[in-house]
Image (spheres, rainbow, N blue to C red):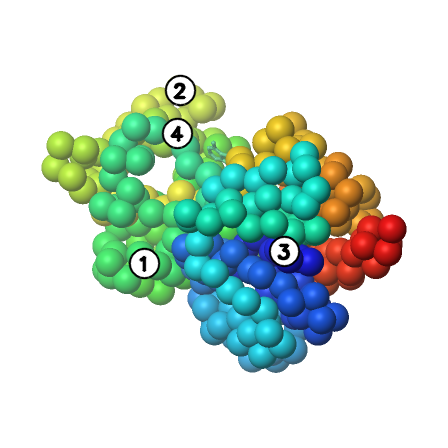
Amino acid sequence: MRKVIIIGSGPAGYTAAVYAARANLAPLMLTGLQAGGQLTLTTLVENYPGFPDGIQGPELMETMKKQAERFGTEMIAEDATAVDFRRQPFVVRAGDASYESHTVIIATGATAKLLGLDAETKLMGRGVSTCATCDGFFFKDQNIMVVGGGDSAMEEALFLSRLGRKVDVVHRRDRLRASKIMQERALKNPKIDFLWNSGVEDIMDVNQGKVTGVRLKNFKTGVVDERPVDGVFIAIGHQPNTQIFRGQIELLPNEYIKVVPGTTQTSVPGVFAAGDAQDHVYRQAVTAAATGCMAALEAERHLETALAR
Ligand code: NAP
């Protein structure tokens, strides 16, 4: 029987673990098979406080992991596959085991969205990617396309411009969603071009098992044309990793976890949600860490009252 189980190991999960462990709650963390969350797919993180020269994403996560371990967090490298929050203690299944706990902190984060094209999944890892940091190296001196108009798309395009011959950003509108500073950097980069009001209709060539080009549609003119490219990076936002919580706690229509405003409390007392799984607005490492802290403090308070009864 556990006092706290933390599901997920991004900034929210690790921060919750540091706080819970230091409060003597002996947390059990299910890190997931791929520990560390989205920051392990990034390069330089320049906006996490305390690192005036920035820090590499994977290094930042390794540091957080060590800090959580130092205070005695037990970590299991499994994905949680099912939960039962209808009974107390709560049950969390992972691998072949079931774990029982008085409180659960959900910190499962979010995953990159895809366009929904058949070719996109077939060519994933064969020229299609959602992570420039992971795969950019394979496209040295080649022609690259980035889809999206937000900060992620600008970040991917800027990173890829250092490796590729040319980067085309395809955006469905004529205005970017990205922050001013990221827009400016991308717009003035001589290696980055923008294809406005356009979308990817298809990616070729599934038969060859590699990306050779894309079919683009201009939504304003209706013109469809094909362009040769070697790599396509999809950067159109994220989907919260909340599937296993459907029917167990209340989710918003966009499938992010609903929490009581200003807290991490979900619809089930004793179950708390931190980080991107419950945040569709800020989605920053530092806000994830902050809500991880809140979740641990709220779990501690819940245990004090619930177990005292
Ligand atoms: P986002 O802000 O939601 O932007 C997604 C972009 O993809 C939008 O431009 C959207 O177009 C486009 N899009 C969505 N679905 C699409 C589809 N099916 N087909 C084509 N285009 C589609 O997501 P994000 O860029 O991942 O950023 C998420 C959050 O993280 C933001 O708050 C952002 O500020 C933050 N972030 C910050 C940094 C940084 O500061 N360095 C880096 C990365 C992310 P529309 O514009 O038409 O909706």
Q: Earlier in the sequence, mark 2 or mark 3?
A: 3
Q: Which residue is mark 3?
A: 1
Q: Earlier in the sequence, mark 1 or mark 4?
A: 4
Identify whether 185 is placed above or below 207: below
Q: CA distance from mark 1 to mark 3?
A: 45 Å
Q: CA distance from mark 1 to mark 4?
A: 22 Å
Label at residue 136: 1
Identify whether 121 is placed above or below 51: above
Q: What secondary structure is found at the residue carrying circle 3?
A: loop
Q: Is mark 1 within 8 Å of ligand 1?
A: no
Q: Is mark 4 within 8 Å of ligand 1?
A: yes
Q: CA distance from mark 2 to mark 4?
A: 20 Å
- Which residue sits at x=52%, y=39%? 82
Q: Amino acid at mark 1?
A: Gly
Q: Earlier in the sequence, mark 1 or mark 2?
A: 1
- Which residue sits at x=58%, y=79%? 70
